[in-house]
Amino acid sequence: MKALFLDESGDHNLLLIDPKYPLFVLGGIIVDRDYADNAMTQQMAAFKRGLFGNDEIVLHTADITRNRNGFERLKESGFREEFYGKLNELISSLKFQVVACVIRKDAHLARYQSAALDPYLLSLEILAERFCRAIGDVESGGVIVAEKRGSLLDRQLEVAWLNLKIKGTRFLAASDLEKRVTGLNLRDKHANLAGLQLADLVVSPIGRHMLGKPDKEDWRIVESKMRKDRDGNYEGFGLVVLPK
């Protein structure tokens, strides 16, 4: 069975667009579920123990960049360099594919105005299609795991998922989605799931790249792991940018 672990970068709210970050990114990793539960979890735990002395700390980009919630030592330049070097080595060594949908909120709102779909729900539809293609014609071949976002937003997401199962998408029949994906599971960030933490770590480099900021080693690793077509192209396969 495959799993799609999802996380987000940016705000899905179309009524409030930050000119410094006018994007919404929903993305994550497609990975073999057994591998995620065992080898990936073990490697990530070993990485944490080697640097922090325990494997309870949760890799969360916001905490890492702000040196908080266990990452206070990253204020030390030497430790920070070691941390990022080993983190990049870890991510590079793990076996997964990256998929992401980037919504340029200002352009999305300008094009569709009052008919503009919620960026999170639109992105979920796009990624569900890619995930089903990655699964292939396999019954109960995959599960989607996303981070909890608050009771109201979680209920909206569950309704949207139910709607996808009933209506399907433009390119995916509801029956195919129902057959291939067993469900959408919402899990708390503090559950310390390796897949969710890795999803968190891949979406931020994508956002920075799409803003035109200087690329770092993490983007190059993420780019190399994008889901690709037979010719090695990831645009439209691993990375979808809307509006086109």
Image (tube, grey):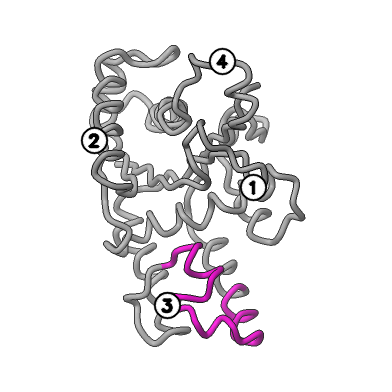
Q: Where does the magenta region start and end?
A: 59-84
Q: Is residue 151 above or below residue 139?
A: below
Position in image of residue 224 (x %, y %): 64, 49
Q: Give the structural element (helix, strand or loop) at label 1.
A: helix
Residue drawn at the location 38% of the way across and 42% of the way down: 4
Q: Quadrant of residue 157?
A: top left
Q: Specify whether residue 67 is painted magenta.
A: yes
Residue 85 in magenta?
A: no
Identify which residue is drawn at 68% across, 54% down. Answer: 220
* Residue under label 4: 112
Specify the quadrant that holds the C terminus.
Answer: top right
- CA distance for labels 4 and 2: 25 Å
Residue type at tag 4: Tyr
- Nearer to us in this view, 234 or 199: 199
Task: From this view, report whether residue 98 is shown above or below residue 112.
Answer: below
Amino acid type, callout 1: Glu
Q: Amino acid at mark 3?
A: Lys
Which one is in front in this view, the residue at disc 2 or the one at disc 3?
Answer: 2
Residue ID for mark 1: 223
Q: What residue is pinned by disc 2?
A: 155
